[in-house]
Amino acid sequence: MPIRGLTRGMSATACMSKAEEVKNHHSTSLDFSQVSLKQVARLIRQLSNAVPLEEKPVNVDEGTRATLVQYQEGTIDLNKEARDEVVLAVKHEMNKKFEENVLRPGDEGYVYDKQVGGNVGVKAVVPNDVCANSALN
């Protein structure tokens, strides 16, 4: 039974109205006497979180493309980049790479709460001028 109109990350209100729609539309073929509307809404919420992200086209002009290449080479600081188009294009690329590499429950190699990398046991280096201006001194 298809549930039309699901979008990724639907709100609780949207899930509840979709649950009411499903219950009303399929009341003749399904017995909803043992299932509450909240349970159906919760199921719809879980289904909506599994909907793939929509690919939205990102318009990239030559200047933005050149900045993207600089970002990939590590020669530009995006925190100082003022153009929204560049930041949006980089976010789009990062999201595409994330979706390609994400492991979900049931996928081969999936580990719950896997922790990778990090600087465990590394002490932070604080410049002397910061310590001198500290309120603790």
Image (cartoon, rainbow, N blue to C red):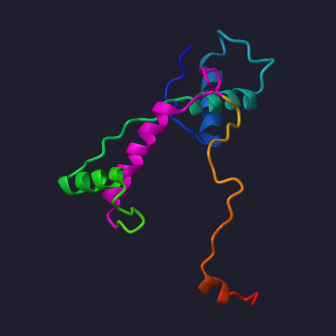
Residue 43 appears left or right of 77: right
Residue 53 appears left or right of 61: right
Query: At 37% from the left edge and 55% from the top edge, which residue is drawn?
Result: 74
Query: At 35% from the left edge and 66% from the top edge, which residue is drawn?
Result: 81
Residue 55 position in % (x across, y down): 37, 36
Per the rendered image, the range of residues in magenta is 82-110
> Is 7 located above or below residue 109 in the figure?
below
Q: Quadrant of the C terminus?
A: bottom right
Query: At 54% from the left edge and 22% from the top edge, which residue is drawn?
Result: 3
Residue 112 appears left or right of 1: right
Q: Main secondary structure of the magenta part?
A: helix
Query: At 60% from the left edge and 42% from the top edge, which residue is drawn?
Result: 11
Q: In which quadrant of the rendered view does residue 95 lie?
A: top left
Residue 90 appears left or right of 45: left
Query: Hey, which residue is sitting farthest left in the picture?
Result: 62
Q: Nearer the viewer, residue 61 or 132?
A: 132
